[in-house]
Amino acid sequence: MVSSIANSLGFGSGIDTKQLVTDLSNASRDPKIKHMATLTQANQTRISALAKARSDLDGFADSLSQMVSDGTLRSTPTVSDESVLGATSRAGLSADSFAATVVVNQLARAQTNYSGVVADRTAAIGTGTMTLSVGGVAKTITIDAANNSLDGLANAINASGAGVTASIIADDGGHRLILKGPTGAASAFTLTADAGADPGLSAFGTGTMTLGQSAANAEFTIDGVAFSRANNIIDDVVPGMSLTLKKAAPGQPVDIGASRPLNMIKQTVGDFVAVYNQLKQSMVAASKLPGATSSLRELERELGGLLHKVISSHGSINKLSDIGISTTKEGLLSIDNSKLDKVLAADAGAVEALFNPRRDATHTEFSDPGIAFALDAIRDKAVGANGTMDRVSKSLQAQKETLADRLEAIEEREDAYRARLEKQYGALDAKLAAFKATQTYLEQQIKLWSNQGND
């Protein structure tokens, strides 16, 4: 009905009621839609500003954490003879005072045993049980009809979880079984055939197999102090340094020390200031917008507090402000390079510890968080449940959904309003057409009457 009325608007009366309906409905709809578009655009601007601020915050925190974790800012170990041992740094190495002499007397070794040659690795070797004992821990190895072969014995040993690796190698005339345990004297092992086992299994006991080498600990000295370890990678002797023993060299001293990447530290200070300022500007841009984003000023204040936050346990150099970083009147950071150079010259280790904090029994994430850990804490709090950014994000998303619902409701109301106008003006047009037809009829009758009178 409405469609037919709309299509006939204006045809009866001669008045352009169709255009009239369009003009009236647009006059009602357009200001409302324009207002909603303005509100939607403003909310989207806030969403984009928040996304930019969060992206900058995440990038800032992640880049600092990555530089710490990959060792970019760590002091680098130096070794006088890398054919004897190698060294890598971990958090905690102090380049200022570290120097030592290492003598590697013996490498840690794993016990190995090998069997005689077996012509066919898939042929039966006997059934029964064997006991594999490593460091006093015994495992039962079962050989039955399902795995009665050299391959089956090797697979059973590997599946036992004892820590001994069994492998089969080709040799002239057949194959040999090789057993290898973990390194260290305490990891020596025995494999024996149990009572009642077929005689053939005893050929693969360690008492019958050939001993390739015995298990032994690494033996070394650091500045004359003797150490013994089950492995050739030593992480628990030199704080912040991992040593890898490569070959035994009794009587041959190897000097180890460390050098600090001063240029990288100075560059990092500059990079920190530059990226902080970029983050600060994006935060300010977001927080200046009216509405929910204004609460980001709370996060701004927390970031600003980094400058004077104690982030190391050093007595006098424990804040960013101690190394020449200050705040401008615009709230950005700047560097006094002269002061930074003086502090680096006086105590480079303290500057390094602000970015690459030491980690040992007395230097923890609580006593020495470092700038990366402190920034991570601010970021995690802000984006976590009910954090500043989390609250703002939820508020903006709710506003976006509310605006979409309001726009849909406006469109429905305006469609209904236009339909009412079409119905009303359709009826008016029909009445006017009827009146016009009556007028035409009357005019014709009057004219007819007048002509009759003249006759």
Image (tube, grey):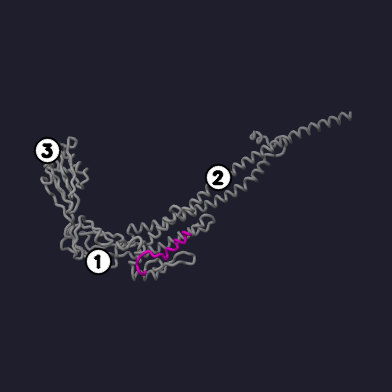
Q: Which mark is residue 198?
A: 3
In primary-sequence order, the first of circles 1 and 3 is 1
- Per the model, the C-alpha gap separating discs 2 and 1 is 70 Å
At 21% from the left and 44% from the top, the residue drawn is 160
At mark 3, the secondary structure is: loop
Name the kind of residue labelled 3 in the image.
Asp
Name the kind of residue labelled 2 in the image.
Asp
Instruction: Where is residue 333? Give x, y as percent.
Output: 44, 65
In primary-sequence order, the first of circles 2 and 3 is 3
Task: Kindly indicate the quadrant of the structure image that contains residue 344.
Answer: bottom left
Name the kind of residue labelled 1 in the image.
Ala
At mark 2, the secondary structure is: helix
Dot 1 crowding, Cα within 10 Å, few <14, some 14–19, many 20+: some
Nearer the observer: mark 1 or 3; the answer is 3
Q: Which residues are magenta?
A: 298-316
Instruction: Where is residue 381? Give x, y as percent.
Output: 43, 56
Instruction: Where is residue 29? Give x, y as percent.
Output: 62, 45
At 65% from the left and 36% from the top, the residue drawn is 6
Q: Is residue 191 toward the left or the right of residue 300 in the image? A: left
Nearer to me, 140 or 376: 140
Q: Which residue is mark 1?
A: 99
In primary-sequence order, the first of circles 2 and 1 is 1
Q: Which mark is residue 405?
A: 2
Dot 3 crowding, Cα within 10 Å, few <14, some 14–19, many 20+: some
Q: Is residue 80 toward the left or the right of residue 47 in the image? A: left
Residue 330 counted in the magenta span: no
